[in-house]
Structures are given as structure tokens and as C-alpha cells.
Image: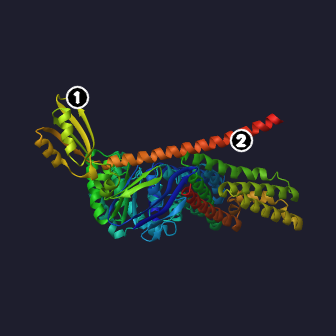
Amino acid sequence: MSAIYFRELKSYFTGMIGPVVVAALMVFIGFHFWIYNLGSGYPYFARALTGVASYLIIIVPILTMKSMSEDKKAKTDQVLLTSAVNTTQIVLGKYFATLTVFAIPVLYSCIFPIILGFKTYHSYLIDYTTILAFFLMGAAYIAIGLFISSLTESQIIAAITCFLTIFLMMLIPMFSSYISDSTLVNAVLFSILAFILVLIVNSTIRNAYASTCIFIVSMIVIWGLYFIKGDVFAGAFSKMLNIVTFSNGISYYAAGVFDLKGIVMFLSVSILFVFLTVQSVQKRRWI
Amino acid sequence: MIEVKNLVKMYGNHLAVDDISFTLEPGRVYGFLGPNGAGKSTTMNIMTGYIAPTSGEIIINDHNIMDEPEEAKACMGYLPEMPPLYNDMKVYEYLKFVAGLKHIKRSERKAAIEEVMQVTGITEYQNRLISSLSKGYKQRVGLAQAIIAKPEIIILDEPTVGLDPRQIIEIRDLIRSLGKKHTVILSSHIFQEISAVCDYIIIIARGHLIASDTPANLINKYASDKELTLKVRGNLGDVTSTLNRIEDAINVRTTPSFVENDCIDVTLNTRDNKDIREDIFNAFAEDGLPILELKSSDPSLEDIFLELTAREEEEAIRREEKEMVDRFSSYETVKDDEFDEGGEA
């Protein structure tokens, strides 16, 4: 794994992507620090960092677009997959390399709370937990980007798809407040979601019988729950959407609330998508 | 030792490898021979664990590649059809990366890289970017990558593609020397390459294994009768009567020569592939007919290869035609039925 990690890390900096991404994020962070903290006098660096989070929509696709796709296109995955390393090690090596590049500007941002500390009374705890949350949110987006990159041979398609996915994740919470809180509507929405998920599962396992069974079981669970304890569905769909799309992002941390749920969500999404990337690489061997 | 059992690979509906089985013993050079698209690369990709078979088993030194992939892969070095090189790396850097990937001990890496660069003749290119190398040198770096960890089994997919004739000879010598210590498997669609270096030949066409044996056995098994051609000065009657006295000459064909006057061209086969050149000489000498030319043509391995693959090709075409006819006729019956029903209504 270390061989792959160091190769990937080096390749970021022999090309343009590494320096450009690191420099851009540093500039964004500095710019927001200047506007919010120095210009408007906010006492917390965390406030500035919440603004930087939205730049991840451009940064993450650029960082991850070639992670898996380039190997597939140049057939360099042949040397990786025929050596005595397993797929998980390959994917983790690449993932950690990308995380390391992302960690450089994040580490740089650790200076700013100290600078503020000279001048004003302020809580280092809030600032540093926000920086941690910012890093973990980035890690989750990077895992999603890595997975998307493993689905295609084209860097451009990977970048655009990753951009659109993060864009959608940022957009959905704006509309989720318009979804009715009625339990029936929510139960129907969950049923539709279950149906879509079953369709996706069926497209990979191609077993109509198993898929039908999964669908029937999920329907029994949803509608059983609806009739026994219907009030759990009140507003549940928009709540779920908000959680899976990180709608609160790092704003809770910046407001001084340590949102454990958020951290758990970032970590689970990272692990889930790294796992899915491994599966996607494995699956390719079978086609 | 490598055991391949009932290997099948389907790409969608296309059958790329159809039930191939063979066993490869250590310390030999094996040649995979087959026309383009025969399934050589697919078989090699499956053997090295790059892609998974649809069914069948690969056992490398008692490790099944599906169940214990890491143990099995550790015994092999693989040069795929396209050398798997990172264009943004320098040669030395790339080999260092591969050495790490193949779990060569940190203390031994430098020596291993130096040695392999020496063997493949890329030492002076070690600080060049791989993207700036020519095709032949990329191929050498690919080869270096495959042999760096000194694996027991070395698998090379068309190793001499893109090399100039001098480099081809060098690489062949290298393969031959590797074959003394390692099991080497190389594929090619070029016949001379295989016959130059391999102890054992496996011929594949259209996903089928059609022959596997040593070159000598292949000749014995598939070669047609020996053929002799000679040119004799004399008239047709005399030549024919002399030829009739030679017992082991069969299938004799005589034609007056177009090129030289009063000469007869003779082509004949010999019974049980006996060498009867001396008999012929003596017989014609007795009758005072001078032999101007006498040539014995050995059927070459190449002829066998061409014939076997052509045969397989014909069979495949026949199979496809039959399939198409079957499908067409069943389609016809359905149509007729529908038409009848429509007519009655």
C-alpha cells in the first residue's frame, strides 16, 4: 500500500493538479479570513471556514478525477492488479494520497486561529473542531469522487459527474423544506426511494426474483411501520435528505455545537464510498 | 507449476476462451501461438489474475488464483500487451515503485533495480521520463518490471512488438537465458519468434486449444509426407522408367521443364517418410541420366501452424453458418404459423 500511496502523492506534484489545488485552497482560506475576520471582525476563524467549504465543489472533482480512471485508461492497473497487493490496499493507497494533498491547505488553515488569538478573546476549541469537521467533510466528498472516478475511463466525465453530484448534494437541502410533513406523503416517498434502490440493485445482480423479494420486504417494513407507528414518518424524508447531503455542513461546529452525528455521517460516507470503489474495481474483473 | 483447468471466458455473448486446459512444468519456455484475437491475451490476463474467468480454475504453485490471489500473484511477473507504465515517472523511479509493490526488501531494492536495468539494457535511460522513451525502450522497461522480483513464472504477452530486429534478437537471448532458471510463457502471433525460443508450443485459435507439444513432436504428429523435387536431363520415357524402379517413391508427378530444354521436373513423396535420396541418385546414375537438382522439403512448423489454425477457422465458420441456418429456419417456421393463423382469421 505504501508504494501506491507514495507514487500517487508524487504524481500529484509532478503534474499541475497538486500545486494548483493546494495553492487555490490556501488563497480561498486566506481570502475568507481577510474578509470575515479581518474585514468584518468576526472573532471566530470557523465562520470564515464555512464559506470555504463551498469551494470543495470545484476542488474535489479536480483532485479525484484521475485517481482511478487514469489507471484504467492507461492500463497501468495491470501492474497493480497482478502484483501481490489486494484491491483494498490499492484503493486505500490512492485515497490516502488524495487526502494528504487535501490535508496540506487544511494544516495551513490551523495557523489562523492562533493569529486571531493574539488579538481577541476566542475559543480555540470551536475553531479547531470546525477545521477537523472541514477536513472530514472533504474526506467524504473525496471518497465520493474516488468512487465516481472508478466508474469511468475518462477524467473529464469523472470530474463533471463528481461536480454534479456535489452540486446536487448542495441543492437538495434547499428544496427539501418544501416536502410535506404528512406521514402518508413521507411513507410514499420512502416507497419510491426503495423502488429506485431496488432497480439499481437489480441492474447489478440481474436476479428478478431476489430483487422482487427485497422490494416486498422493504414495502412490508415501510408500510408496517406506517400503520403501527406512523408518526416516525412525520418530516422524515426531508430530515434524511438533509443528513445524507451534509446540509448542515460544518455550520453547527462553527456555531459552537459539537455535532457528533455530522462526524459519524462524514466517516460513514467515506468508508461506504471507499468500499464501493473497491467493489467497482473488483466488478470490472468479472465483465 | 501452473495448472489451467477448463478455462472459459465470456465477454457478454462472445466466447473468448472456450474450455482450455493445460499444465505447465517449471523451468521451460512455453510459447502461446495463435492468430490475432485467438484468446492469448485473455488467457494470460486470467492466469495473472487481472481478470476473472467465467468458469474454470487456475492453480499457480498450489495456490488457486481466485482463493489465494496474493500468494499466487507473488510467484508471477507479467508484461501485458501494453506495458503498464506511468508516463509521468522516470525509469528508475518507476522501477523503485514496482519493487515496493512487489514487496522486495528495502535493503535489496537498489541492487535489484540496478541488476534488472543492466539485464534489459536501460541503465543509461534511468533518469529519462517514461513518456519520452521510444516504443522499444518502453517495452524494455515493461520487461524489467516483470522480472524485477525474480518470480518463478514470467509471463510475457507479445514481448518483441515494436522492437527493431537487433533488439528482437537481444530480447530473445534474454528470454532464453531467463528460461534456464524460470518458467517463461510468451505469446505471439509471429511464428518465428515462438520457434526460436520455446521448448513447448501451445497453439490457440478462436478460443480453442488446438495443439500443445514440443516442436519436434508437433512435426511428427501433424506433418504431411516428405516431398522430394528433382530435375533430371533426359526424355520423359527414360525418366519414368527409372522412377518406376524405385520402390519407395510414391505419388510421382513428372512434367517437362519450362525453363530448360530436355529436362524433366519430378515431384514425389516417399513411403513412410524414408530418406531415398541415395537410391534415386544410384538409379539415375545406372541409367546415365544426370540429376541436375535434388531437393528435399521438410514440412515446417509454420505450415503446421497455418494449417491447424486454418482448419479451426473453417470449423468455426461452419459452426456459425449452421447456427445462423438453424436460427433462420426457426424464424421461418414462426413466421409461417403466424401467417397461417392470420389467413384463417
Nearer-the-camera pick, B136 or B329:
B329
Is the residue at mark 2 from the same chain as the one at mark 1?
yes
Amino acid type of disc 1? Answer: Phe
Q: Which of the labelled discs sits on residue B334, or is there none?
A: 2
Amino acid type of disc 2? Answer: Val
- Judged left or right of residue B37, residue A183 is right
Instruction: Report whether residue B19 is seen.
Output: yes
Query: Residue A46 is drawn in which quadrant?
Result: bottom right
Query: Residue A126 is drawn in which quadrant?
Result: bottom right
In the rendered image, which quarter contains the N terminus of chain B?
A: bottom left
Nearer-the-camera pick, B34 or B290:
B290
Element on which disc 1 rests: loop
The residue identified by callout 1 is B258
First of labels 2, 1 by sequence position: 1
x and y percentages locating residue B111 in the rendered image: 29, 65
Q: Which of the labelled discs sits on residue A66, or is there none?
A: none
- Judged left or right of residue A264, residue B98 is left
In the rendered image, which quarter contains the C terminus of chain B?
A: top right
Nearer-the-camera pick, A203 or B323:
B323
Instruction: Report whether residue A30 is seen.
Output: no
